[in-house]
C-alpha cells in the first residue's frame, strides 16, 4: 500500500517548482523502490493513474524492479498508447526486464505503423493523420530496434528488413545490428550495397563486418 511519503514525493515529481526539485523527488522515489518501499499493488496502482507523469514514473519503476505482475498492464499500455513519451519509457522498461515477453507487441506495433492500409483505418487503435503515425514511428523506432536486438529471433527479419533503407543512418545501423546480433543472414547484394554505397561510414563499417563473416562461413 502506498504511504503518505510516496504521495508527497509523487506530488513533487508532478508539481515541483523547478527541474531540480522534480529530479530530487525522482531520486528519492527510486531509493524507496530499492528499499522495498513499494509492494506490487503499489506499482500497479501507479500504472493505472491517469496522470502522465505518474504513469511514466510507474513504467520506469516496474522496469527497474522487474515486477512480473505488471507485465500484462505494460503490454496493454504499449498496444493502446500513442504517446511517444510513454512508448519510449515502456521500451526502456522492456529492455530492463531482459525478456522476450514483449517481442510480439513491439513487432506488431512497427508493422501497424508502417502498413499503409492501416494508417487510414478507422478501426486503428492509434488515431490521427498519417504524418502523426510517421512521427510516432520515428520516435520509437531506434528503441524498438534496440529491444528487438536483445530479445528477438529469426522471425523479426521481415519486420526489420525495410528499415535497412530508412533515410536516417542511425536507423539503418540499428536495423543492420539486429541482423548481426541475431545472426540472421542477409542477401549478398544487400550487404554489398550497404558496404560500398551507404552514405554513412558507420553503416559501411558494420556491413563490412557482416560481409567478412559471410565469407568466413563460406570458407571450407
Image (cartoon, rainbow, N blue to C red):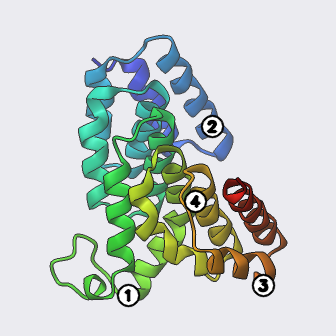
Q: Secondary structure at mark 2?
A: helix
Q: Relative to 113, say whether 65 is above or below.
A: above
Q: Relative to 41, say whether 133 is above or below.
A: below
Seen in the image, is 45 located left or right of residue 16? left
Crowding at dot 2, Cα within 10 Å, few <14 / some 14-19 / many 20+, comes out as some
CB atoms of marks 1 and 2 within 8 Å? no
Q: Which mark is residue 179?
A: 4
> Which residue: 57% across, 68% down?
186
| Residue 82 visible in the shown view | no
Q: Quadrant of the N terminus?
A: top left
Q: Relative to 12, say whether 36 is above or below.
A: above
The residue where tag 3 is placed is 197
Q: Please state which of residues 40 and 2 is positioned toward the viewer in this rendering.
A: 40
Q: Please state which of residues 19 and 158 is positioned toward the viewer in this rendering.
A: 158
Looking at the image, tell me whether mark 1 or mark 3 is earlier in sequence order: 1
The residue where tag 2 is placed is 23
The residue where tag 1 is placed is 130
CB atoms of marks 1 and 4 within 8 Å? no
Q: Secondary structure at mark 1?
A: helix
> Which residue: 48% across, 77% down?
135
Seen in the image, is 117 located left or right of residue 93? left
Q: CA distance from mark 1 to mark 4?
A: 28 Å
Seen in the image, is 46 located left or right of residue 202? left
Q: Secondary structure at mark 3?
A: helix
Residue furthest out toward the top = 35
Amino acid at each position: 500500500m502506498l504511504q503518505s511519503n510516496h504521495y508527497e514525493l509523487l506530488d513533487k515529481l508532478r508539481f515541483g517548482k523547478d527541474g531540480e526539485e522534480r529530479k530530487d523527488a525522482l531520486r528519492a522515489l527510486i531509493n524507496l523502490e530499492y528499499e522495498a518501499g513499494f509492494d506490487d499493488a503499489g506499482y500497479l496502482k501507479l500504472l493505472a493513474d491517469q496522470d502522465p507523469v505518474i504513469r511514466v514514473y510507474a513504467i520506469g519503476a516496474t522496469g527497474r524492479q522487474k515486477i512480473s505482475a505488471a507485465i500484462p498492464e505494460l503490454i496493454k499500455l504499449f498496444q493502446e498508447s500513442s504517446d511517444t513519451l510513454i512508448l519510449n519509457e515502456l521500451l526502456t522498461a522492456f529492455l530492463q526486464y531482459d525478456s522476450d515477453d514483449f517481442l510480439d507487441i513491439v513487432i506488431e506495433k512497427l508493422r501497424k505503423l508502417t502498413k499503409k492500409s492501416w494508417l487510414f483505418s478507422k478501426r486503428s487503435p492509434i488515431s490521427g493523420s498519417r504524418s502523426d503515425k510517421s512521427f510516432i514511428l520515428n520516435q520509437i523506432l531506434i528503441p524498438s530496434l534496440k529491444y528487438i536486438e536483445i530479445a528477438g529471433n529469426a522471425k523479426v527479419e521481415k519486420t526489420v528488413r525495410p528499415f535497412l533503407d530508412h533515410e536516417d543512418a542511425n536507423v539503418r545501423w540499428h536495423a543492420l545490428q539486429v541482423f548481426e546480433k541475431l545472426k540472421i543472414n542477409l542477401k549478398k547484394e544487400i550487404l554489398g550495397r550497404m558496404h560500398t554505397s551507404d552514405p554513412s561510414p558507420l553503416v559501411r563499417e558494420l556491413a563490412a563486418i557482416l560481409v567478412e563473416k559471410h565469407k568466413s562461413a563460406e570458407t571450407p
